[in-house]
Image (tube, rainbow, N blue to C red):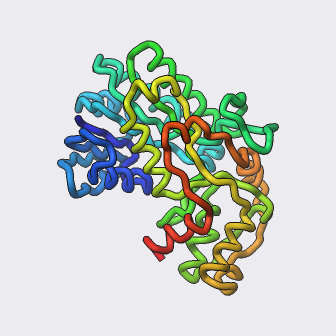
């Protein structure tokens, strides 16, 4: 069975490639790794590593011609950029996704598709804990685009063209590497940079509560969705992945406990109203009973998330 990861050069894509090569999804015999810059191969399985822009004319058809049985669609313009660059966000996050689904539909093999959606599909007002059937009311272009792709994939699956599952990922923290343009990027930066002895800014109040998961647990959730028997996951075309609810202040408390007060003192407080508006428009906690019943993984608490990062990168 051939698996394709679109967005494989990103942090989640690279980790997912490694997990699959290590057997996280039974039955995979080879990998096609795709990104705008050719990803690095991973040991353990035969790999094709391709540089391709999913939004370019003909790119989706070229990828579909490789006949994948399973596609992880992780490619996206992130939240901050999608809000600032309206046309780019729609071209990449919506139009390119529709082109991909059409190209896969033309195969007539009903490939499995796992789409990385986001909690940004929700918007205020919402309760303290958002139920699984809560109405979609995105408050950003990024959230709107993700919601539209969820609906597309569900309809293509209903019609029997694909077998699709959309996973609403929690905010992923702590991300390694350089900062990105995501509105949530500071939720990694206020931990990653101080652990490296560097200054970081927190643009929101400490009482801001967020729904997060670690990189490893997030990737394990993506792989788990693909490994589940289709008959078991098919009734749930969209799932809220499991996460934990934590305040920014609690995250900084954990930083201080792990690295001391000097590390916490490296975090400055310069408010950014634009970032705060986006982040505070996201829910603080979710009901994830369906994901729990399907045995999706979850982090036990935030100190465990921070320890995961320190053990791997600090």
Quadrant of the rendered image containing residue 4: top left
> Is 288 left or right of 108, judged from the image as shown?
right
Rendered location of residue 159, percent (x, y): 44, 13
Residue 98 vs 48, above or below: the answer is: above
**Residue 237 seen in the figure:** yes
Rendered location of residue 129, percent (x, y): 74, 43
**Residue 87 seen in the figure:** no
> Is 79 left or right of 220, judged from the image as shown?
right
Residue 170 vs 300, above or below: the answer is: above
Is 247 in front, or is 117?
Answer: 247
At a point 52% along the width and 27% down the height, the residue shown is 236
Is 69 in front, or is 200?
Answer: 69
Rendered location of residue 302, percent (x, y): 62, 64
> Is 204 left or right of 314, judged from the image as shown?
right
How many marks the image carries: the answer is 0
> Is 96 left or right of 249, judged from the image as shown?
left
Residue 314 vs 119, above or below: the answer is: below
At a point 47% along the width and 36% down the height, the residue shown is 115
Rendered location of residue 155, percent (x, y): 50, 18
At a point 22% along the width and 46% down the height, the residue shown is 48
Quadrant of the rendered image containing residue 58: top left
Q: Quadrant of the N terminus?
A: top left
Residue at the left extreme, as displayed? 46
At a point 30% along the width and 46% down the height, the residue shown is 33
């Amino acid at each position: 069975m051939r698996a394709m990861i679109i967005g494989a050069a990103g942090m989640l894509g690279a980790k997912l490639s490694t997990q699959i090569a290590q057997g996280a999804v039974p039955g995979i015999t080879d990998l096609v790794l795709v990104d705008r810059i050719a990803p690095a191969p991973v040991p353990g399985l035969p790999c094709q590593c391709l540089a391709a822009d999913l939004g370019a004319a003909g790119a989706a058809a070229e990828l579909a011609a490789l006949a994948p049985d399973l596609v992880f669609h992780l490619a996206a313009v992130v939240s901050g950029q999608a809000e600032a660059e309206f046309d780019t966000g729609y071209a990449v996050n919506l139009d390119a996704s529709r082109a991909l689904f059409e190209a896969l539909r033309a195969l007539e093999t009903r490939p499995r598709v796992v789409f990385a959606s986001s909690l940004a599909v929700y918007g205020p007002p919402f309760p303290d804990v958002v139920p699984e059937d809560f109405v979609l009311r995105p408050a950003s272009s990024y959230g709107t685009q993700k919601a539209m792709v969820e609906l597309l994939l569900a309809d293509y699956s209903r019609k029997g063209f694909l077998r699709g599952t959309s996973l609403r990922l929690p905010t992923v923290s702590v991300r390694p590497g350089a900062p990105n343009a995501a509105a949530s990027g500071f939720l990694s930066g206020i931990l990653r940079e101080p652990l490296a002895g560097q200054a970081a800014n927190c643009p929101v109040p400490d009482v801001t509560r967020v729904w997060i998961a670690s990189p490893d647990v997030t990737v394990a959730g993506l792989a788990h969705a693909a490994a589940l028997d289709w008959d078991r996951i098919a009734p749930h075309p969209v799932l809220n992945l499991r996460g934990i609810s934590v305040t920014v202040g609690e995250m900084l408390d954990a930083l201080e406990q792990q690295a001391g007060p000097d590390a916490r003192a490296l975090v400055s407080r310069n408010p950014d109203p634009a970032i705060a508006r986006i982040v505070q428009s996201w829910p603080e906690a979710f009901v994830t009973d369906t994901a729990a019943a399907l045995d999706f993984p979850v982090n036990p608490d935030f100190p465990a998330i921070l320890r995961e990062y320190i053990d791997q990168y600090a």
